[in-house]
Image (spheres, helix red, strand yellow):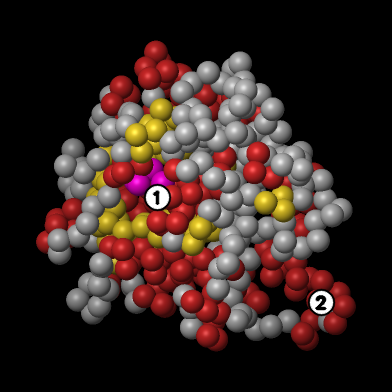
Amino acid sequence: MLDRRVVITGVGLVTPLGIGVDETWAALCAGQSGIDEITRFDASAYATKIAGEVKGFRPEDFLQKKDAKRVELFLAYAVAATRMAIEDSGLIIDDSNRNRVGIITGCGLGGLNMIEQTSVMISKKGPKRITPFFIPMIIGNMAPGMISIYFGAKGPNSSIATACAAGTHAVGDAYKTIVRGAADAMITGGVESVISPCCIGGFNAMKALSIRNDEPHKASRPFDRDRDGFVVGEGSGILILEDLECALERGAHIYAEIVGYGMSGDGYHIAAPAPNGEGAARCMQAALDNSGISYDKIDYINAHGTSTPINDFYETMAIKEVFKDYASKIAVSSTKSMTGHLLGGSGGVEAVFTAKAIYESIAPPTINLDNPSDECDLDYVPHIARNMNIDFAMTNSFGFGGTNASLILKKYS
C-alpha cells in the first residue's frame, strides 16, 4: 500500500484542437480533427504535407515580452499550459512551499526548428551571427527550467527525453516523486513543437507518416484498415499533481487520482515495437501490479494508437495479452485520431484527456474508424464520444528505442 496518495488538481492544454482545456475537450468530444495543411514551411516537395499545428497561439499572451520574441515554440507552449494548470488548480507557490513544488516534463526533440534555422544561417552568414540564446533555447530541459523561473517552483526539476513516451514517463516520475516524499506537489506533463523540414522529411524517409494529403482531417485513422501512418502534431499538456493530504488541506478541486505507473524496454529494434507487443504488455502489467488492482477493474484505455499498421496491431495484441477475455469489454480509444501524434508531448496531453474522461464520465472517440482492421477487433469507441462511468483508466505511450510507459488513473473517492 502506498504511503502517500497522489491526485491531479489542475490541468492545462495547448493542442491542435484549441488553446485551453475547455476548447480542446469540447472539440475532442465532438470528434473534430485538428489536422490540416502545413503552414510553418513550404511542404510542397515533401511526401507529407499535413500536420496538427496549433492555431492562433500568441506567445506574448503567456510570456514576458522579451521572452515571447526569442523562445522556441515548445517553450512557450510549456509555459502557457503550465499557467493554465496552476490557475486551474488554485495552487499558490510562495516562500512557504516553493522548495516542495517540483517540475518534471517530457520532450522528445526540443528546439529542432532553431537548430535547422541556425544551421542554414551559419552556412550563409557564418558563425558570428549565432545568437547567444541558441543553446539555452534548444535543450529540452529548458521547459522545466523556464517553468521554474516563471512560477517560482524550486523543488525537484528534470526533463525526460524518452521519445514518444516522454510525457507519460514524466507524469509517472512526478507521481513517484510525491509518493516517496521528495515533493508535495509537482508540475508535470509533456511538450513538443517540431513541425519542420527535418522532422517531416526524416519521418517520411522512414515511411512512418500518412500521405493522405487530400483529406487532412481523415489522415489519422488508428485501427482502421486504410491507415497509412501517423500525423505529426504539436502542443503541450501539463498537470498539477499533489499529495492528497496537502490538496485536501487547501480545499483543492480533484480530477482523478494516480494509482499505478509501469515502465518497460523492448530490447528489440531502434524504431519497430517488439513482436506481438510483448514489451507493451509487460509495461501495462507493471502498471497494474504497481496499482494493486486486477485487470478487470479498467474501464477505459487511452491507447498509444498512432495510426501506423504495426503499432495499432501490436498494441491490440498487448491489450489482449494483459486483459485476456476482458479486453473486449474495455472502451479503448486513440485521441491521436484528432490531435495527431505530439511525440514527446503526447503523454502529457493524453494524461489530461484521461483525467478528464474519468471526471466527466466520457470516453473520447476514435474518429475515422470507418473500416476496422481484421486484426484490430476491440471496442475503439468509433466516431462518437461515449457517456460512461469510468472508475479506472489506463493511458499508454510507446517510443522509439523500445521505451514504454503506462499510467493508471482512478476516480477520486
Q: Residues within 10 Å of mark 2 (few under 14, many from 20)?
A: few
The quadrant where residue 181 appears = bottom left
Q: Quadrant of the N terminus?
A: top left
CA gap, disc 2 and disc 1 = 40 Å
Residue at 68 percent across and 58 percent down: it is: 195
Question: Is 97 in front, or is 224?
Answer: 224
Residue type at tag 2: Ile
Image spot of residue 293 (x, y percent): 26, 29
Question: Is 212 in front, or is 307?
Answer: 212
Q: Quadrant of the C terminus?
A: top left
Q: Is residue 104 visible?
A: no
Residue at 28 percent across and 63 percent down: it is: 89
Image spot of residue 359 (x, y percent): 29, 44
Q: Which one is in front in this view, the residue at disc 2 or the one at disc 1? A: 1
- 335 is higher (above) or lower (below) than 112: above
- 268 is higher (above) or lower (below) than 95: above
Residue type at tag 1: Val
Secondary element type, mark 1: helix
Span shown in magenta: 352-356
Residue at 86 percent across and 53 percent down: it is: 45
Find the residue positioned furthest to the top.
325
The residue to which callout 2 is attached is 122
- Look at the image and say whether residue 177 sits in the magenta stretch: no
Give left or right: position of 402 versus 225.
Answer: left
Image spot of residue 197 (x, y percent): 77, 58
The residue to which callout 1 is attached is 352
The quadrant where residue 186 appears = bottom left
Residue at 82 percent across and 71 percent down: it is: 120
Image spot of residue 257 (x, y percent): 26, 45
Give left or right: position of 250 versus 197.
Answer: left
Secondary element type, mark 2: helix
Most common SS among magenta residues:
helix
